[in-house]
């Protein structure tokens, strides 16, 4: 259980520091978000993650219909929560959506790793590798989609960004249906690796393009208003 917690929460906190360090003190004089709200959103996301994982555990995600339904449902939870009036058309909503996703991903990763290690007991290195990949994959997936949806809310373009987040999640779930159906054979490893590469690519886009672009746009608007 301690190892599952470390693999779930550890990557989430490390990614939060790595991605957000350039948007807060001491890198900038005026942070682009409130640290207290950021960690509150992380905590809220953790609660959502527990609920989602418990409900999801009653269904076989290897069945494509369930894989599709849960991908959409999980993004709808982020979408509905981030669309409350206090978050609409505000720059920091991108960061709070990111933090919400990190929280969801961390507790879902905890559950997935715990179950994987239990089921893989005695199987050696393969079980640990799968557990580690699952943890990283879930944290990257939910933080990326949270940031996308948060950015859509901040820009007033909610449906386009929600669709992008939903399609990413659907793609990952469809790829992950392969190892769920074929186990740890060649097909299973191919699905697991492709799903992980997909979320790594999208997280890179969030880290290098999406969040910095939001800050640049907001800074340009502020300069234009002053001018």
Image: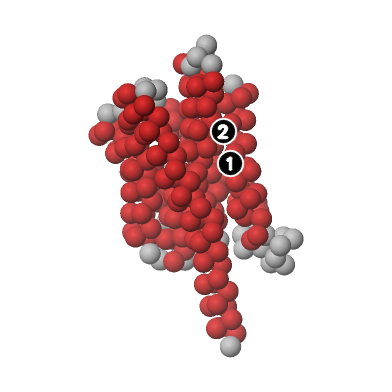
Q: How many marks?
A: 2
Q: Residue at x 48, y 38 (%)?
A: 137
Estimate how packed mark 2 is, as few (under 14), some (14 to 19) or many (20 or more) residues with alpha carbons within 10 Å: many
Q: Quadrant of residue 179?
A: top left
Q: What SS does tag 1 mark? A: helix
- Choose between 132 and 63: the one closer to the eye: 132
Q: Residue furthest left?
A: 65
Vertical side of 50 occupied by 73: above or below: below
- Choose between 187 and 162: the one closer to the eye: 187
Circle 1/circle 2 CB separation < 8 Å: yes
Q: Position of residue 48 (x, y in %)?
A: 48, 38
Vertical side of 51 occupied by 209: above or below: below
Q: Which residue is mark 2?
A: 8
Q: Quadrant of residue 187?
A: top left
Vertical side of 225 occupied by 22: above or below: above
In the picture, measured across the screen, residue 192 lies left or right of residue 11, that is: left
Q: Which residue is mark 1?
A: 12
Q: Position of residue 209 (x, y in %)?
A: 51, 61
Vertical side of 94 occupied by 215: above or below: below
Picture quarter with the N terminus: top right
Q: Position of residue 4 (x, y in %)?
A: 57, 26
Q: Specify whether residue 151 is in view.
A: yes
- Mark 1 and mark 2: span between their CA atoms? 7 Å
Estimate how packed mark 1 is, as few (under 14), some (14 to 19) or many (20 or more) residues with alpha carbons within 10 Å: many
Q: Residue at x 52, y 72 (%)?
A: 217
Q: Residue at x 53, y 78 (%)?
A: 221
């Amino acid at each position: 259980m301690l190892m599952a917690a470390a693999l779930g929460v550890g990557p989430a906190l490390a990614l939060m520091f790595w991605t957000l360090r350039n948007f807060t003190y001491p890198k900038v004089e005026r942070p682009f978000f409130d640290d207290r709200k950021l960690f509150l959103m992380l905590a809220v996301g953790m609660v959502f993650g527990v609920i989602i994982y418990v409900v999801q555990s009653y269904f076989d995600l290897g069945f494509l219909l369930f894989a599709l339904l849960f991908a959409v449902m999980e993004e709808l939870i982020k979408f509905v929560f981030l669309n409350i009036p206090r978050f609409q058309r505000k720059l920091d909503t991108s960061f709070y959506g990111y933090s919400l996703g990190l929280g969801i991903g961390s507790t879902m990763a905890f559950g997935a790793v715990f179950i994987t290690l239990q089921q893989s007991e005695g199987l050696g290195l393969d079980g640990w590798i799968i557990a580690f990949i699952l943890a990283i994959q879930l944290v990257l997936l939910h933080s990326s989609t949270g940031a996308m949806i948060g950015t859509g809310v901040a820009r007033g373009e909610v449906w386009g960004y929600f669709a992008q987040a939903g399609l990413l999640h659907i793609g990952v779930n469809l790829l992950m249906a392969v190892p769920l159906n074929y186990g740890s054979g060649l097909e299973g490893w191919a699905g697991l690796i492709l799903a992980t590469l997909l979320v790594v690519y999208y997280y890179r886009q969030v880290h290098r393009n999406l969040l910095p672009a939001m800050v640049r746009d907001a800074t340009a608007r502020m300069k234009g208003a002053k001018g």
